[in-house]
Image: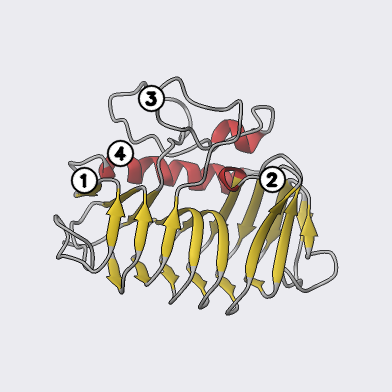
Amino acid sequence: MTNTGPTIITGDLGVSPGTSCTGFPAPCTGGPGVVIGTIYTGAGSLAGPAQSAALVAYNDLVAEPCGTKLTGLILGTSPGAVTLSPGVYCFPATAQLTGTLTLSGSGVYVFQIGSTLTTASDSSVVLANGATAANVFWQVGSSATLGTDTVFVGSILAKASDTVTTGTSVTGRVFALTGAVTLDDNVITVAAPPLGNRARTSRPAAGSSPGHPAARRTLALKLDASAPKTKTARWVGRSFTMTKAST
């Protein structure tokens, strides 16, 4: 995990199985970044089971049947990829966001991306008509790069790494399963849970639409290591920006 500039994370930050974390307060190397939550480092911390649960969630997203192929289309620009309703959308190879993508309607949005996800500078994802950030999932087969001043929504689960460039904001979570998360003067904020889907505890539960397979399987990262294990990764409510770092 590497941060440059006054990044603010509202939620938890974790590094597992390593402990390398720069640009945030102890146990990292020190600011200028701020974490309004808890920092976990090492496989023996809550970052360990979180890393494992994120991998299960990633595989569950991969297994979702594709509803609509967007091959060759650019999100936010190409006709048919400017305003989307709930569903599972797939890009066999790369995916790009340029301009403004509107997600319209209450439900779960899953984006399956075979290799890389990139966004252009000043691009954005906008929610409308009941769509919520907690219900948006981006499964990225390799790495995600968010261009400068992007306004992004949803949970990114990248198989390799995530690079969030200067001035970009994310309402959701950022996961790198085998590589690093690189931040630079960003704002990352937990996605508020949809009404009617709060956990029994005081922590908000990210997730949604119980009837949708993606919602049943990818509700939110379970940080509570003492909780009963389930067949799939059940997510938890606090934002968790996580990287698999070396020691």
Q: Does residue 192 sit above or below 162 in this rendering? A: above
Query: Mark 3 or mark 2, which has the lower sequence index?
Result: 2
- Indicate the amino acid at tag 3: Lys
Q: Which residue is mark 3?
A: 229
Which residue is painted at 73% across and 40% down in the image?
Answer: 106
Q: Is residue 84 left or right of residue 152?
A: right
Q: How is the image coloured?
A: secondary structure
Q: Position of residue 202 (x, y in %)?
A: 40, 26
Q: Nearer the viewer, residue 36 or 246?
A: 36
- Indicate the amino acid at tag 4: Pro
Task: Look at the numbered disc 2 and give the secondary structure of its residue.
Answer: loop
Can residue 178 be seen here? The reply is no
- Indicate the amino acid at tag 1: Ala
Q: Does residue 205 sit above or below 72 in this rendering? A: above
Q: Residues within 10 Å of mark 4 (few under 14, many from 20)?
A: some
Can residue 200 be seen here? The reply is yes
Q: Which mark is residue 49?
A: 4
Query: Mark 2 or mark 1, which has the lower sequence index?
Result: 1
Q: Which residue is mark 2?
A: 131
Q: Nearer the viewer, mark 4 or mark 2?
A: 2
Query: Mark 4 or mark 2, which has the lower sequence index?
Result: 4
Quarter of the image where the C terminus is located: bottom left
Q: Which mark is residue 28?
A: none
Alpha carbon separation for disc pair 3 and 4 = 11 Å
Query: Mark 1 or mark 4, which has the lower sequence index?
Result: 1
Q: Does residue 203 sit above or below 112 in this rendering? A: above
- Indicate the amino acid at tag 2: Ala
Alpha carbon separation for disc pair 2 and 1 = 35 Å
Q: Which residue is mark 1?
A: 43
Mark 1–mark 3 CB contact (< 8 Å): no
